[in-house]
């Protein structure tokens, strides 16, 4: 089986570890460890009748609910089978701008979407270890994730706001922004009405633990949404998820619980990583942590799988990072401790 390019490939991990996929403790995919809200399974059971029918091709109700959540009209919303699906059309839009500046290291799907349409790509390496970061001030298209995957760096809203007057098209992938509580988030959504050159991508798969069910959306000026809809295939969001989406966004209790979990469990996990000889984690605003490692990450990954049935994300698919780093999701306290114990037992620091 090929080495995975994304996190969460439990089949590959199970083969290396010599166990069932269910036995793998997965730190490689950045999914909420609280799982999907408890009521979701009942909701799906009760709505199974929907699978016989085509969903509404306009997704009127879902777009209305997403729009209401963000104080936007439905015309500013389009939905997709996960953020990755919608990235395809954002890649097409960006490719028309001449040169696209991609902030690197970049999520692999950013590359895919741009290359699919022959975009002329120029990379801009994020100096994530520095305190003060200045982005290029002008250009054609700009694509970045905020919080940034895989570094966890959070661009302040004001800094991105300042770019909107000088870039032709700015696409911000906010797939992890919902993990930040309202007082810390740096979303640009409130700027949409002022800037028709701003496009924001959101995912519900990570925060709501629905990576297998899939739902994402794009927020942009109605002209852009009209264009993306013309490019898109019909019915790409299935009827069950279309019915579910609005209820997820209204589940304030689950949102609160997730923010509390991350606020409580991130600091001891980060500290635990920082004190292991040979490891250096970078501070992250999101639910994952990038870690520099003295032991090449593929070897560390193999040892953790074989000896502990734990899967971490190597960064081989990010050319700027290579074998010197790995990324881990923040999970539940006991699970985080299991990883820390396993890392501590592997003798990572050079003699
Ligand atoms: C930055 C970023 N955007 C988008 C996605 C894809 O999200 P979805 O599961 O909604 O397709 C990921 C998945 O890891 C991601 O890291």
Image (spheres, helix red, strand yellow):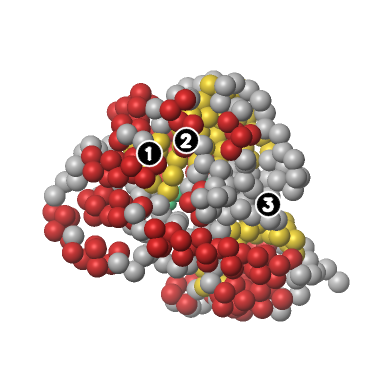
Contact (Cβ within 8 Å) of mark 2 with mark 3: no
Q: x, y (%) of residue 304?
A: 62, 73
In space, the residues marked 3 and 1 are separated at their CA atoms by: 41 Å
Secondary structure found at label 3:
strand
In space, the residues marked 2 and 1 are separated at their CA atoms by: 8 Å
Total tally of numbered discs in the picture:
3
Residue position marked by numbered label 3 in the rendering: 322
Q: Is residue 250 visible?
A: yes
Q: In which quadrant of the rendered view does residue 140 lie?
A: top right
Mark 2 Cα shell of 10 Å, populated few (<14), some (14-19), many (≥20): few
Q: Is residue 3 visible?
A: no
The residue closer to the viewer here, 142 or 159, is 159
Secondary structure found at label 2:
helix
Residue position marked by numbered label 1 in the rendering: 71
The mark nearer the N terminus, 2 or 1, is: 1
Q: x, y (%) of residue 280?
A: 75, 61
Q: Nearer the viewer, mark 3 or mark 1?
A: 1
Residue position marked by numbered label 2 in the rendering: 190
The mark nearer the N terminus, 2 or 3, is: 2
In space, the residues marked 2 and 3 are separated at their CA atoms by: 37 Å
Contact (Cβ within 8 Å) of mark 2 with mark 1: yes
């Amino acid at each position: 089986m090929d080495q995975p390019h994304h996190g969460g490939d439990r089949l590959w991990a199970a083969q290396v570890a010599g166990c069932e996929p269910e036995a793998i403790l997965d730190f490689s995919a950045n999914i909420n460890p609280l799982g999907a809200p408890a009521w979701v399974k009942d909701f799906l059971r009760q709505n199974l009748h929907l699978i016989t029918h085509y969903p509404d091709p306009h997704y009127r109700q879902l777009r209305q609910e997403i729009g209401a959540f963000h104080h936007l009209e439905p015309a500013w919303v389009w939905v997709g089978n996960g953020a990755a699906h919608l990235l395809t059309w954002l890649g097409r839009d960006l490719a028309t701008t001449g040169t696209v500046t991609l902030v690197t290291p970049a999520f692999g799907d950013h590359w895919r979407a741009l290359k699919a349409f022959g975009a002329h790509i120029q990379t801009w390496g994020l100096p994530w270890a520095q305190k003060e970061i200045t982005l290029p001030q002008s250009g054609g298209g700009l694509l970045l994730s905020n919080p940034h995957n895989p570094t966890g760096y959070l661009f302040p809203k004001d800094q991105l706001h300042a770019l909107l007057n000088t870039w032709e098209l700015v696409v911000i992938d906010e797939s992890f922004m919902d993990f930040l509580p309202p007082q810390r988030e740096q979303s640009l959504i409130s700027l949409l009405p002022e800037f028709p050159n701003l496009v924001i991508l959101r995912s519900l798969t990570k925060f709501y633990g629905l990576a297998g069910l899939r739902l994402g959306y794009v927020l942009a000026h109605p002209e852009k949404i009209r264009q993306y809809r013309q490019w898109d295939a019909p019915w790409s969001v299935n009827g069950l998820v279309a019915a579910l989406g609005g209820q997820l966004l209204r589940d304030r209790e689950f949102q609160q619980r997730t923010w509390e979990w991350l606020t409580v469990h991130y600091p001891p996990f980060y500290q635990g990583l920082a004190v292991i000889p040979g490891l250096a984690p970078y501070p992250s605003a999101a639910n994952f942590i990038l870690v520099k490692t003295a032991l090449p990450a593929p070897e560390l990954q193999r040892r953790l799988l074989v000896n502990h049935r734990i899967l971490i994300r190597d960064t081989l698919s990010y050319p700027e990072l290579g074998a010197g780093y790995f990324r881990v999701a923040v999970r539940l306290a006991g699970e985080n401790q299991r990883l820390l114990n396993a890392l501590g037992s592997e003798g990572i620091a050079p003699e």
